[in-house]
Image (cartoon, grey):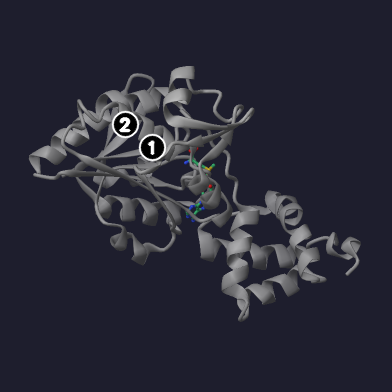
Amino acid sequence: MDPLQAKQQMTLAEFRSLRDFIYAKSGIFFNESKQYFLENRLSKRLGELGLRTYGDYLSLLQGSQGPAELKRLFVEITTNETSFWRNPPQIEAFQNIVLPEAAKLARERGQTRLRIWSAACSSGEEPYTLAMICHELRDTALRGFTVEILATDISEKVLAQAQDGVYNAYTLRNLTPEQLQRHFLTLGRDLFQVKPDLQRYTAFRNFNLVDYGGYRTLGSFDVIFCRNVLIYFDEAVKGQVLKGFHAQLHPHAYLLVGHSESIHAFNTGFELLHFSKAMGYRKRA
Ligand SMILES: C[S@@+](CC[C@H](N)C(=O)[O-])C[C@H]1O[C@@H](n2cnc3c(N)ncnc32)[C@H](O)[C@@H]1O
């Protein structure tokens, strides 16, 4: 088809129907100022599929090819920005306070496995940062524990990147030369891969945070990281997601959200913790 046709404008009615569909499937809510964002992200896909209108695209999503196309839609519409050591004060609080305390609580419960969930892990920088810290503490605070970092996302594309664990030097700029040498293999002048030693802490899988019935299948956690994704959700979805986290956390276990994300309005089941230059939450018993 003529690619120019695919660039045709999305009507307001099409935008609203697509927006409501996306919200129902992912919890991501686009307000009306985001019409052009959706148009930009989806016009190429329309061209690839040979579709003329966004209405046709929605029909495809609702039809028998819908489940497969939904995966593509999630790849196109998600914002996957992330970095190693993102929000350093919070990561330091994790290393110095949260992790040792979580291990202490787990030990008291008789656990030998410590489980961390990186919910919305994007291309892996967050879970690998956590894995580096766990590796450092394996003979001290984490002595006697097997650590499992479950890392989930809704985008198959970033999950595949995370699983590969291959990053360029720019992406790895926040690591010290020692961390780079200790945890990464050099593949080329500008390409490095996470060593198996670090990779074995992590398990990647697709999980949609609006799959409220699915949380139980993930098991219980000592720490949940859910950073920089709640901002895409409205209050109703945030409330449900936080309920899901609450149910999967052990008593007094930790929840760390993005620095601009507050769960103030929903925090009935959590207490707010003030760390040096960072905040966190802990499940009330
Ligand atoms: C901005 S990134 C944040 C990555 C990382 N947590 C961080 O703070 O650096 C947001 C991620 O949330 C994911 N996401 C969006 N909606 C989701 C949903 N309903 N379920 C699971 N992941 C979702 C996106 O695919 C994206 O990779």
- Gap between marks 1 and 2 measured at Cα: 7 Å
Q: Is residue 261 visible?
A: no
Find numbered disc 1 in the image and state the secondary structure of the residue it sits on: helix
Q: What residue do we see at 42% from left, 33% from top?
A: 129
Image position of 106 with respect to 53: above or below: above
Task: Please identify the quarter of the rendering in which residue 104 is found.
Answer: top left
Q: Left or right of 132: which side holds 142? A: left
Question: Which residue matches tag 2?
Answer: 135
x then y, percent, for residue 118: 39, 44
x then y, percent, for residue 125: 49, 37
Q: Residue furthest bottom?
A: 64
Question: Which residue matches tag 1?
Answer: 198
Label at residue 43: none
Q: What residue do we see at 68% from left, 75% from top?
A: 60
x then y, percent, for residue 47: 81, 64
Nearer to us in this view, 236 or 208? 208
Image position of 26 with respect to 83: above or below: below
The reply to whether callout 1 and callout 2 are in contact (CB within 8 Å) is yes
Q: Residues within 10 Å of mark 2 (few under 14, many from 20)?
A: some
Sequence-wise, which precedes: disc 1 or disc 2?
Answer: 2
Image position of 259 with respect to 269: above or below: above
Q: What residue do we see at 40% from left, 42% from top?
A: 199
Q: Left or right of 82: which side holds 196? A: left
Q: Residues within 10 Å of mark 1 (few under 14, many from 20)?
A: many
Find numbered disc 2 in the image and state the secondary structure of the residue it sits on: helix
Q: What residue do we see at 20% from left, 28% from top?
A: 141
Q: Is residue 109 visible?
A: yes
Nearer to us in this view, 212 or 35? 212
Task: Please identify the quarter of the rendering in which residue 110 is found.
Answer: top left
Q: Amino acid at mark 1?
A: Leu
